[in-house]
Image (cartoon, rainbow, N blue to C red):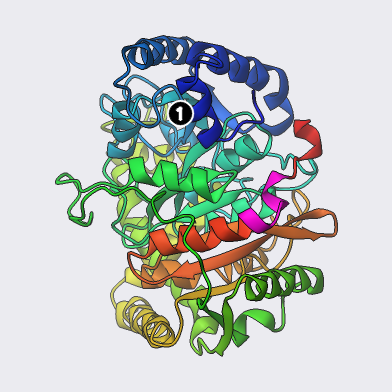
């Protein structure tokens, strides 16, 4: 049963081939048996999941169950869950149990989904390898000596290891798409504001966006149909009605114009990764699409602009963790200043401290205009590049990451090398566009991701384009050795 996709589970539940309790129990046993290899979960909510599954079976028996009723999923540990620890991968929130659910979590509860627990992540979503977690590094099911990508590495590894068919995740600079590429899964970052951020612990508020990681584009469409909804509690959430993203999956893509940025195929791209992406583009031509060479001239500025804007927003967002109201508090503080300094110094990890310091510096008097304001001006230029490109093409494609998954610990001593792993994904967040990664082959024996970037609010077309490729290929059906 663990090999079933979400779409297949939905059909199986409705055809009474198995119950929600049966598949939930099976997956919980699998997590207990296998996840010590991957460390993809921080918290497993076994008893609660069985109760939710039994309630789902009752709704299914009545015949009026919603779409995802009885389907097991897991949530990235950045989404607040009432009564269940929400740590954000940090010692700072190791003891935090929220009294409320994030809107995304509530949406899945309303849809009848069953939550198996909370997945591991880079601390406060800051990282590209899932090695900064307070709970230890996540291992890639394709090779447990390699990273799964980050920050949503736990979500991606859990799906790749067939521990759960779909998970929620978040993407601030590529944190859904990059781990999806490195684990051979399908990851979708929606348009900024398409999915509510209420109850999602903030890293960089103008960049963060929730989305799903699944095995197929069809499953991503099913999850996005539940996740994406207007929310009065989030002022940045778009007031757009909920829609069925599966409706147009089978539309023909004949005549589709695919933009291929020359900047995404230059220096720094692994030759085998580039070859797999070019082969995927040729497959799209066979499906009737047209390749159009385009330029995104300011894309080389995306990484430096991002690593000013994101840390600046993080330094403001993380100021709330002070050891006073909730979260970690140091022992026996001498005074209030000592309480603040030691609680934050002991509660935050090295990468989080690094970004807080960078962000505070960029926002400080005398440097705001030189750094933060300038980075925002560059951000506008990057956005305009995409606006100009979408005047000529329907979607943009290229590699998701420049390399396949690297070895654990390989880049920990070089933060810049780590940051460059997101070189192809960051611009999409700066522009607020939707993007996704789908498997398109292997390089050096490890998965390669093809990135698809859509125009604003064009998730339906993007999913259609991804689904058509997956109907004509079987890369998304390959199973990681450790999951067999």
Q: Dot 1, how many residues are within 10 Å of its Cα: few (below 14), some (14-19), or many (20+)?
A: some
Residue occupying image coordinates x 33% and y 15%: 59
Q: Is 407 left, or right, of 232 in this rendering? A: right
Place of residue 87 in the rendered image (x, y in percent of width and height, measured from the top left): 44, 32
Judge whether 484 appears above or below 349 on screen.
Answer: above
218 over 278 or under it: above or below: above
Disc 1 secondary structure class: loop
Where is mark 1, residue-wise? Answer: 94
Tell me if residue 103 comes above or below residue 468 in the rendering: above
Q: Nearer the viewer, residue 297 or 222?
A: 222
For the question of whether residue 307 can be seen, the reply is: no
> In the figure, residue 265 lies in which quadrant?
bottom right
Q: How many marks?
A: 1
Residue 382: quadrant of the picture: bottom left
> What is the x, y in percent for residue 231?
19, 46
Part of the protein shown in magenta: 471-477
Judging depth in this view, the residue of 192 and 124 nearest the camera is 192
Q: Is residue 472 magenta?
A: yes
């Amino acid at each position: 049963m663990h090999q079933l996709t979400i779409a297949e589970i939905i059909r199986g539940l409705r055809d009474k081939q198995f119950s929600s309790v049966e598949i939930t129990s099976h997956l919980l046993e699998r997590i207990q048996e296998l996840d010590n290899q991957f460390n993809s979960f921080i918290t497993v909510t076994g008893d609660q999941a069985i109760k939710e599954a039994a309630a789902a079976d009752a709704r299914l028996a009545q015949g009026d169950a919603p779409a995802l009723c009885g389907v097991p999923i897991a949530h990235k540990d950045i989404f607040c869950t009432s009564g269940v620890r929400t740590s954000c991968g940090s010692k700072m929130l190791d003891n935090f149990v929220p009294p409320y659910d994030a809107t995304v979590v509530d949406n899945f509860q309303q849809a009848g989904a069953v939550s198996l627990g909370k997945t591991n992540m880079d601390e406060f979503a800051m990282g590209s390898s899932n090695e900064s977690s307070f709970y230890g590094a996540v291992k890639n099911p394709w090779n447990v000596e390699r990273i799964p990508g980050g920050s949503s590495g736990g979500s991606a590894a859990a799906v790749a290891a067939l521990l759960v068919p779909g998970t929620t995740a978040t993407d601030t600079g590529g944190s859904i798409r990059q781990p999806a590429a490195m684990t051979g899964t399908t990851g979708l970052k929606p348009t900024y504001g398409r999915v509510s951020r209420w109850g999602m612990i903030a890293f960089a508020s103008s960049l963060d966006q929730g989305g799903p990681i699944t095995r197929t584009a069809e499953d991503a469409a099913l999850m996005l149909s539940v996740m994406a909804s207007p929310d009065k509690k989030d002022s940045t959430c778009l007031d757009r009605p909920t829609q069925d993203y599966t409706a147009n999956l089978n539309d023909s893509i004949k005549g589709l114009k695919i933009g291929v940025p020359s900047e995404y195929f230059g220096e720094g791209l692994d030759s085998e990764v580039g070859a797999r992406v070019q082969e995927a583009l040729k497959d799209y031509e066979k499906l009737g699409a047209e390749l159009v060479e385009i330029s995104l001239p300011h894309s080389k500025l995306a990484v430096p602009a991002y690593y000013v804007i994101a840390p600046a927003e993080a330094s403001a967002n993380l100021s709330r963790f002070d050891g006073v109201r909730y979260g970690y508090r140091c022992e026996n503080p001498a005074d209030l200043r000592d309480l603040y300094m030691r609680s934050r110094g002991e509660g935050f990890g090295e990468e989080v401290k690094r970004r807080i310091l960078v962000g505070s510096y960029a926002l400080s008097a005398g440097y705001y205009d030189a750094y933060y304001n300038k980075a925002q001006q560059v951000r506008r230029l990057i956005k305009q590049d995409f606006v100009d490109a979408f005047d000529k093409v329907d979607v943009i494609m290229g590699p998701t990451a420049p390399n396949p998954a690297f070895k654990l610990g390989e880049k920990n001593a070089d933060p810049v090398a780590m940051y460059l792993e997101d070189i192809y994904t960051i611009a999409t967040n700066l522009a607020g566009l939707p993007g996704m990664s789908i498997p398109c082959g292997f390089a050096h024996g490890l998965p390669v991701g093809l990135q698809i970037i859509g125009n604003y609010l064009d998730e339906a077309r993007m999913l259609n384009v991804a689904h058509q490729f997956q109907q004509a290929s079987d890369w998304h059906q390959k199973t990681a050795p450790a999951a067999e």
